[in-house]
Structure formats: C-alpha cells, structure tokens
Amino acid sequence: MNKLPPPVIDIRKLCKSYGSHTVLDGFNLTLYEGENLVVMGKSGSGKSVMIKCIVGLEDYDAGTITVMGKEVSKLEHDALDALRTDIGFLFQGSALYDSMSVRENLEFPLRRHREKFRDAKDTTPLVMEALENVGLPDVIDLMPEELSGGMKRRVALARTLILQPKIILYDEPTTGLDPITAKEIIGLIESVQEKYRTSSIIITHDVDCARVIADRMILLIDGVNYAEGTFTELSASEDPKIQAFFK
Ligand SMILES: Nc1ncnc2c1ncn2[C@@H]1O[C@H](COP(=O)(O)OP(=O)(O)O)[C@@H](O)[C@H]1O
Ligand SMILES: [Mg+2]
C-alpha cells in the first residue's frame, strides 16, 4: 500500500449541540495533505457548523480538532489568528464589501494579517496574482456592483487565495450559480489545488461538482461520518441512505 501523506486536519468524535438539538454526534474527518475532500450532507445536517468549528468560529462540546498539529480549542487569540491565515475559507454566499473596489476588497485581508505580509510594501503584485489566478486580471478597479454573480464569486475566491493559505475550506462554492458558471468555479478550485498544492475541504450537494473534484468523499448523515470513499465507490453503494445523494 502507498504511504498516505500526513494529515493536515484531523477531527475526532466531534460533538456539537444547540440546546437540545444535537447537530454533530461523534463526527470524524481526516484531510490529508494535497487532497480535495468533498463533504456531502443534507441541508441542516451540520456541514457549515463543522467548518466553523475548524476555524474556531464556533465552540464545540466534545471531541478534538487538530489542524496542522495544533488543537483548535486550546489556541489563544493570537495563535488562532495565525492559524486563520493558513486556512482560507470561502463561506456560503461569501459577500464582497460593496463600498470597496475589487482592489480594496483584496487588500483587506492583507491588512488584517500584516504579520505574514510585512515585507510586501506594494500589494499590487499580490492583488494582481490573485486576480490572474481566477481569470480576472482586468477588474481590479471595478466596484462589486459592476460584476456579474459569477465574477463576484471569483473575486471572493481571489480574496481567499491572496493570503496563500495551505488549507482552503469551501462552503457550497457553486450554490446559486448557473451550471456553466458553476463549472468554471469548479475548474478554478482544481487549478488552484494543482498550482499551490493546497489541501481542501469542499462542502457541496452538487453531484457534478463532487464527481469532478473529489479525491475522496465523506457523507455526513445523522451527525456522523456515515460513509467515506471515492465518488465511484460511494455512487455504486446499494445503501439507500447513500444512494439518495447520487440521484
Ligand atoms: N448559531 C446557531 N444557533 C442555533 N442553531 C444553529 C446555529 N447554527 C446552526 N444551527 C443549527 O444547526 C444545524 C446545522 O446547521 P448548518 O451547519 O448550517 O447546516 P448545513 O449542513 O446546511 O450547512 C441546523 O439545524 C441549524 O439550524
Ligand atoms: Mg451550510
């Protein structure tokens, strides 16, 4: 058997409830370096909550989340902030700041994370590189209202990429886009992964997206990692709960 690359995120027995409502009930996930891991689950199954726990935006009740060797719940403010420069996240419907130009939107995270970019006096090359990576070198001086929905999503991706994250968490990156634009976004996610060797978790219920992008998949059902495998393995399953995702 081939040796597995090292894990960059390891989630063990994660539990999270809101009042009497149990969302995650012993969820496990390992993300290996360089892979695209797709997480699928019904709406309301806890996918976004899980992502927020990884970046420390939500506390969890039990279990452990280890990111690049560090346990998230034990990190102090500064260490958590440093961790967040290494993890890029593209939230569901990730919005740009409407009152800022594309350039200002992209410079914003650079200013917040000055430590990592203190040598960059002129940020224009970083902004340009990020825009080129999403195929939009010409929009730097436009305002968000001048962009189409698909272009906004690309600029949001560029804003995530500009921090040169080692890990990227995508929460429903193609939801709300027409099929052609969705395909373009999937293509970008793939090319980013190839170019920078990032490790990514992609949350989606878009089967076409999963088919193209998943090195491996986890199905989140009833608060646990109900099934894991490649797209081919899971889509051939005879378990009705698993089949339901591939119809
Ligand atoms: N801040 C919160 N307070 C109470 N309930 C929440 C909160 N955030 C999420 N939930 C509940 O947790 C469940 C999982 O939500 P979420 O992770 O957003 O689902 P999804 O899998 O669609 O991303 C939902 O039932 C949601 O209502
Ligand atoms: Mg969600």
Image (spheres, helix red, strand yellow):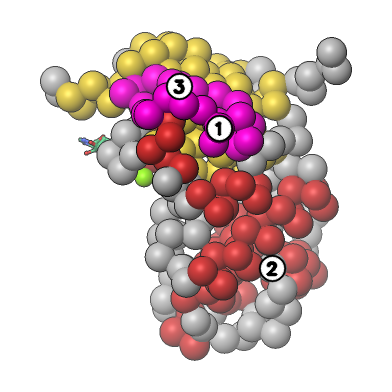
User: Relative to 119, is 36 above or below?
Assistant: above
Cβ of mark 1 under 8 Å from ligand 1: the answer is: no
Give the mark nearest the N terminus, 1 or 3.
3
Residue depicted at 31% across the width and 23% down the height: 222
| Number of marks present in the image shown | 3
Instruction: Say which amino acid is labelled 2.
Output: Val
| Mark whose residue sits in front, 1 or 3 | 1
Other residues around mark 2 within 10 Å, as few (<14) / some (14–19) / many (≥20): many
Instruction: Say which amino acid is labelled 3.
Output: Asn
| Quadrant where the N terminus is found in the figure | top right
Residue 208, quarter of the rendered image = bottom right
Q: Which residues are magenta?
A: 221-241
Residue 126: percent from left, percent from top: 75, 64
Residue depicted at 49% across the width and 23% down the height: 227
Query: Which secondary structure, mark 2?
Result: loop
Position of residue 179 in the picture relative to residue 214 (left or right)? left
Position of residue 55 in the picture relative to residue 106 (left or right)? left
Q: Which mark is residue 134?
A: 2
Q: CA distance from mark 1 to mark 3?
A: 18 Å
Residue linked to disc 3 = 225
Residue linked to disc 1 = 236
Residue 170 at least partly seen: no
Residue 169, quarter of the rendered image = top right
Instruction: Say which amino acid is labelled 1.
Output: Ala
Do callouts 2 and 3 mark residues in contact (Cβ within 8 Å)?
A: no
Residue 219 at least partly seen: yes
Give the mark nearest the N terminus, 2 or 1.
2
Give the mark nearest the N terminus, 2 or 3.
2
Residue depicted at 42% across the width and 78% down the height: 99
